[in-house]
Amino acid sequence: MGTRGALREQRAGRLPGARWGLSFAAVFLMGLVVGSGPAAGQPIKIGFIGELSGLLAQYGEDSLRAAELFVEQTNQRGGVLGRKVELIVRDDKTRPDEAVRHARDLIFAERVDFLVHSISSFACLGVSEVAKQARKLVFSSCAIDDFTIEKGHPYAFRIPNIITRTQGRAAAQYAATHFPQKKRYYLIGHDFSFGRRTIEFFKGKLRELVPGAEIVGEAWPKLGETNYAPYITSILNARPDVLMFVMATAIPFFTQAQPYGLTQKMEVLSAYWGGSDEMRILKREHLPVGAIVGGFPWYGMDNPLNRAFVADFKKKHGREPRTASYFISITLEFLTEAIRRAGTIETEKVIEKLEGMALETAVGKVTLRPGDHQGTTPHWMGKVQYDGRLGYGVLTSLVQVPAEQFLPGPAELQRIRQQAR
């Protein structure tokens, strides 16, 4: 049985993945509470859970800005199926327990029709499990592979393909292509699943593409670390050719590292995180000029849909969108288009329309793979430079990364999920 067929069988309750841990009576009562949906003409309710405070607030805030813009424009055009869209917002404070609590509240108290989660890898698996038990469709933009791969399930979808697997492998491919003669690598990543997994995928691909590559040191600062001086000293003492970093937020690291001139002494590389968004936030004197980072830089996508999105976002919010803004806007674009094609908000019928759907978006054509519900967005990598006209750091010498090439094929996906059980 193929992966897509397995997902359908799970929804029908015929495979082990459909054992929701609830009695038949509980499932029946839950259906009465959350499965009936509002009457025609009532708003379509979308529950939004985002990091509006805490460590990742800059990403959650930009997600919400884009969601508000999308809902406003959709309602101005008459809504979806003649119904207004209502966004019900919750702040998870970048805490997984808060995210799970809000997911339950949105489903069982607010009776939302769909869930949208922002980017936190700490929280998305917990939110996903709540949605799975309630058979409620959930989207997340989190970077941890498990959301759609190891622990993917029929109700979980993700549009952005900036995940640990694609980020780590994309960085290794960039290194192999642009400085293959450099062999000595130092790795630094925040000590949680996102950092560990990205580095793991990077090392695996590096060994494949760069024969003789040597790891001369690794460092694992805790999430939220404020003192990077000992780590910077260790990096300098190891004298690597390349520093590969993976951090939930790299602003403190770059702020403290700049006086040491790391980018003059070695290549500094990351596939995305610590990327185009953070270069806009860092002060000019703290920019790691010459470092290679990634993201969805608004100035790197020259197409009519992106130009319109940037203009609309700037008109409403006074500045250009950041990466998380693209994540959520495209997510809502897929969701609302699936509802239109289904002609209903009934979960199963919306899922059927989402599987395999392809749309032209501000970042190009994106397809939702039917087997794992993972989107195929590309991302961009480039060298950091200060732009005097814009007044912040930008990426130059941009390279578009077709990250879909790093996703598992159907057979590999099936093997990964079987091993994860």
Image (cartoon, rainbow, N blue to C red):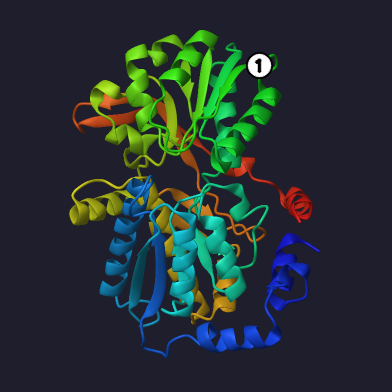
Q: Residue 249 at what x, y percent from top left? A: 41, 37
Residue 127 versus residue 160: which sits nearer the camera?
127
Q: Residue furthest right?
A: 1
Q: Secondary structure at mark 1?
A: loop
Q: Residue at x 64, y 83 (%)?
A: 27
Q: Is residue 262 left or right of residue 72?
A: right
Residue 397 sits above or below residue 273 on the image: above
The residue lying at 42 percent from left, 37 percent from top is: 224
Number of numbered discs visible in the structure rendering: 1
x, y percentage for residue 54? 36, 48
The three-letter code of the residue at mark 1 reads: Ala
Residue 58 lies left or right of residue 23; in this view the side is left
Tell whether 345 sits left or right of 28: left
Asked if residue 357 can be seen in this view, the reply is no
As displayed, is residue 330 above or below residue 31?
Answer: above
In the picture, which quadrant includes the C terminus?
Answer: bottom right
Q: Image quadrant for the N terminus?
A: bottom right
Q: Nearer the viewer, residue 261 or 303?
A: 261
User: Is residue 255 placed above or below 403 in the rendered structure?
Assistant: above
The answer to whether residue 145 shows anywhere in this view is: yes
Residue at x 58%, y 85% (from the top left corner): 31
Rendered location of residue 130, percent (x, y): 56, 68
In the figure, 329 relative to 379: above or below?
below
Q: Alpha-carbon neighbours of circle 1 within 10 Å: few (<14), some, or many (≥20)? A: some
Question: Is 210 left, or right, of 284 in this rendering?
Answer: right
Q: Is residue 4 or residue 206 the one in the foreground? A: 206
Q: What residue is pinned by disc 1?
A: 213
Where does the image place residue 207, in percent across and percent down from the top left? 69, 23
